[in-house]
Every structure is written in C-alpha cells, then in structure tokens.
Image (spheres, rainbow, N blue to C red):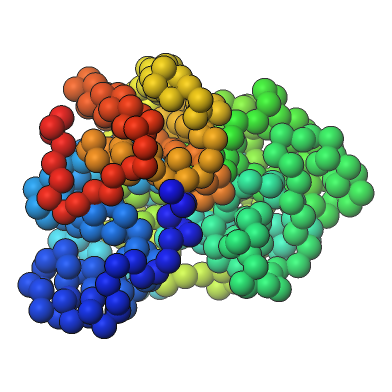
Amino acid sequence: MLPWSEYPVTTVLQESDRAAASAAAPADSEERILGLYRAHLSKGRATLAELFGSHMETASEGAWLTTSDGERFLNAGGYGVFIMGARHPIVMEEVERQLRTHPTATRILLEPTVAQAAEALVSVMPPGLDRVHFALSGAEAVETGLKLARAGGFRRTVSMKGGYHGKTMGALSATAKEVYQAPFRPLVPDFLHLPFGDADALEAELAAHPGEVCVILEPVQGEGGVIIPPAGYLKKVEELVRQYGGFLILDEVQTGFGRLGTWWGADAAGVVPDVLLTGKALGGGVLPVSAAVATRKAFRPFDKDPYVHTATFSGQPVLMAAVQGAIRAMHEEDLVAKSARLGAELLPKIAEIAHRNIPDLVVDVRGQGTLIGLELIEAGLAGELLIELFNHGVVANHSMNGSSVVRFTPPAVLTATDVAFLLNSFDLATRDLVKGAATMPEGGTKSAAR
C-alpha cells in the first residue's frame, strides 16, 4: 500500500460522476460533504478521507470523537492538540463566558484577557522567558521567533534535518523536507540544515560565524517520527550557542504543554532558550492559539515599535480565555504528571505488542511522555496500520517528515478503560496487518470492540 500522499486524486468514479452524485445527495450526507471537499478544498484531502471510509466527524468529548453515523473513535491523534481531550469543561467555561461578553477586541484600548493570559503563560515557562507574542498557528509562532532573531542581528539560521517548523515561507525554510520546499523556491536565504543530535557539526557552523547564527530545533522531533536526541544534546546546544554568541529558538509547538511529561522539553533538558514557541495544546483543544515567549533581551526589537510585528487576531479575548482555561485545567487536573504516568504505561505495552505481533515489520518503538512513535520497515505499512487502527476504533497520526512512523499523541485524560481499549485495538490492528493488505473502511463498518 502506498503512503496516502502518493494516491491519485481520483480513484473509482470520474469527476463528472462524483459531482452528479454529490449534487443529488442530502445536504449533510457524507457523499455531499465529500463532493464539497472536491469542489472547493483539496482533492488530495478528499482522497485521504476516502481511505478512511469517508467518515464524517461531527462531535467530540474528552478522548472520544463521534461520526455522523454514530460510531465512536478513541482519539490518539490530533497532532498533539488534545493533551486535555476535546471540549474540556474548564476551557469551555472560560471560552463561553468570554463569548457572551467580549469575544473580539479593537486592539487599541487596554484589554484584560490578553494581559492575564500572558501572565498565566509566563508563570509556567522556564525562568527568564517573560515576554509574549500571541498568534494563531504554530507556523506564525515560528515566524515570530525567526523575525526576533533577524531583527536582533542573527542573519544566518541553522535548523535540523528531519525537523518540522511549519509551511509559511520562513518556517518552511527551516523545515528540511524537499517535497515541501521544492514548489516554493527560492525560500528565505541563509538557512542551513544540520543532522539532529550532531553537536560537533553545530559547533563548526557557530564557530565559523560567531555572533551571527540563530539555531532553531525541537526537543524531540515530532513530525520527524518521534526522534529523541542523545542524552545531553539540548544542553550542549545551549552551551554552544552561548559560547559563540548565537540565538536559540526552541520549537515546542508539539512537545510543549505537558506532551513530554514535563511542562516543556526545555525543563527536562535544563535549557532556557532566547525564544520558546508553543501552540497546538495551548488553546485547550478548543481554539487555535500559539505564542512565542522570549527573554526581555530577545524581545527588545518588538518593544521599540508596537507595529513592527502585528496580527489582527493576535491576543483576541476569546482566544485568551481558552489559554487561561487550558493552563487552569493543566494545574487543577495535574495533567503534566498524568501525561508522564500515561506515557510510562503505554510505551512498554505498545512495544511489547508490536514486537510480539509484527516482529519482522518493526524497526523501533520510542517515545517520551504521551508522544509515542512506532517505526515500521516501510511507509506503506505505516499507512496500512493507520487504517487497521481506524477499523478497530482508534485514530492515530502519520508523521510528515517520517512517513514510516505511526504516531500516538493520546490525551493525558485517558481512563483505565480508555487505555485498555487503545491497547486492545492496537493488538487487533497489528494482528490484522500481518494478514495482508489493509481492508479499507466502509461507511457502515462497525468495530465489535465498540
């Protein structure tokens, strides 16, 4: 089976046939919605949906999502967004209160929620990171960090092979993936990609350009396939950056906010960057929010001119309510510690099942906290396993920079019953994987386990 991105944008029906069928379908039917995807969105995205039976997700709560036909799926995917599950009551309470009073601000007058959200976010940051710029997407946070570096005089940027930082022009320049970069060249100049984990290669570059280099990297490469660096690597990176007068950006859009079993990967490594990037889970699984959190020195270019880096929806009240709710939920439910405990339980059990059921197909099982990756011997098998997991009621993720890796990012709120369901489904999916090609889900497919 091919990786999903290599499937043709048309499969069985011709476009004209599909358009006619879609037009005749009920307005809220899966067929109608799939037709709208093809007509107005990405045809490739529609093809991906077909691989998973064209199911239509319409509701979510906690660790579970529900489709239009009433099927329920355990959400161990979501690309790291759902550390506290979907529609967490504390986050919803804060957001709903703000919606009823003042969801969007003029950005001219003082507005309390953005100041309060910044205070709450700084309170859980490594010491010294106390200036905040809010944005919407992770890529926007990356752009903010890169612009702070350029404005501070750091004109050369080093990122790591296998790293993923987003797909806007600056972020894409840092994302070392040929298939994503090629259609958009020329990109931002003076970017260099070095091997992740190779401190010697980094030192050579820093030494060749003292006082000029910005280094951006992830504590663990999520989209790279859950690549964990050698022990002490992040601390060594920080030491080298300081030694040669560089600028350090730590991209924690996926790894932060409890995902690794600590508030930040920076905490586990004992590192304080010049800028730490966060997103995904920052909006509590309810709204899209990201942030770049910097030291006072690094943030200085933005202090000089309040209009040098702005965005209309940066810090809007309803988004800031979600941030405050998310941080409150993390504290009140001790979700960082729960993520650590859950990961410590799941990782060895997933590894045991994989090595028992598909020993010849597994390269590695690795993870930190609730960021867990299963590497298979080829990308096609990863695609098949994703489908088999779906057939048994579990949503997981592929890895965009590591296509042979199936990634699990379950919520820290999983119950013991949820954990048992996830492990049982994984056991059944891996057993089915060795029987042959994955069976494509159909609209009415039901899982006996559900």
Q: Is residue 269 found left or right of 338 in the rendered image?
A: right
Q: Is residue 210 found left or right of 434 in the rendered image?
A: right
Q: Nearer the viewer, residue 186 or 449?
A: 449
Q: Residue 297: in sight, yes or no? A: no
Up/down of 355 relative to 312, above or below: above
Is the C terminus in the top left, top right, bottom left or bottom right quadrant?
A: top left
Question: Residue 158: x and y, percent?
Answer: 74, 51
Q: Nearer the viewer, residue 440 or 330?
A: 440
Q: Quadrant of residue 274?
A: top right
Q: Quadrant of residue 190?
A: bottom right
How many numbered markers are drawn?
0
Q: Residue furthest right?
A: 208
Q: Residue 201: in sight, yes or no? A: yes
Q: Nearer the viewer, residue 448 or 423?
A: 448
Q: Residue furthest front?
A: 436
Q: Quadrant of residue 43?
A: bottom left
At 54% from the left and 58% from the top, the residue drawn is 166
At 79% from the left and 34% from the top, the residue drawn is 199
At 37% from the left and 37% from the top, the residue drawn is 436
Question: Residue 250: x and y, percent?
Answer: 61, 43
At 39% from the left and 55% from the top, the residue drawn is 289
Up/down of 126 relative to 193, above or below: above
Question: Residue 201: x and y, percent?
Answer: 83, 40
Question: Residue 429: x and y, percent?
Answer: 31, 32
